[in-house]
Amino acid sequence: MSTEQIWQTESFSLDATLTLAGQVGSRLRGGEVIVLTSDLGGGKTSFVRGLAAGMASHDLVHSPSFTLSNQYKAGDLTLCHFDFYRLNDPGIMRNELAEVLKDSQAVVAVEWADIVADVLPTDHVLVRIQPTGDTSRTVTFEFPDNLNYLFPTNT
């Protein structure tokens, strides 16, 4: 099992958060799982929007709060975005997530992942977004050594 690393940075605007996420997104290879945590309205979907842009997706990214999942094409990769905020029981969505996790060409981003934690792989990136002002955020990444290629300061 690999050692866990932590990288924390400050973002002082939405554009800076999108740029940060875009830097991570540009390094995605497929098969990665990104779990996003924050308060409601804290910037999780905005972070996914930046990931998609960094992956060179031209799709419009929006919150899957009501649809539960969205997919965005990015070259040979697919960004699969799940939001389990409204679920009391994941039911069939647990199966859908498990299937997507087997796809090496998929990058999986999950909001409100506690309800499906048993399905998620051990090696994933945890992104904690903590609002510190109207547009500023502290963004903390926790990740195993084998995913350090995703982070600009760790390459």
Image (cartoon, rainbow, N blue to C red):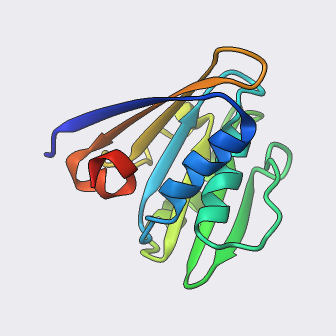
The percent position of residue 103, horizontal first and vertical second, equals 46, 74
The answer to whether one can see residue 125 in this image is: yes
Number of callouts: 0
Q: Quadrant of the C terminus?
A: bottom left
**Residue 122 lies in what quarter of the image?**
top left
Residue at 71%, 53% (x, y): give it: 49
**Residue 147 lies in what quarter of the image?**
bottom left
The percent position of residue 63, horizontal first and vertical second, equals 80, 47
**Residue 51 lies in what quarter of the image?**
bottom right
In front: 140, or 40?
140
Residue at 31%, 58% (x, y): give it: 149
Q: Is residue 121 left or right of residue 25?
A: left
The percent position of residue 29, horizontal first and vertical second, equals 42, 71
The answer to whether one can see residue 94 in this image is: no
Residue at 49%, 48% (x, y): give it: 34
Q: Is residue 14 above or below residue 38?
A: below
Q: Is residue 148 left or right of residue 61?
A: left
The percent position of residue 153, horizontal first and vertical second, equals 33, 46
In front: 127, or 96?
127
Residue at 60%, 73% (x, y): give it: 78
Q: Is residue 149 above or below residue 120?
A: below
Residue found farthest to the top: 132
In front: 103, or 5?
5
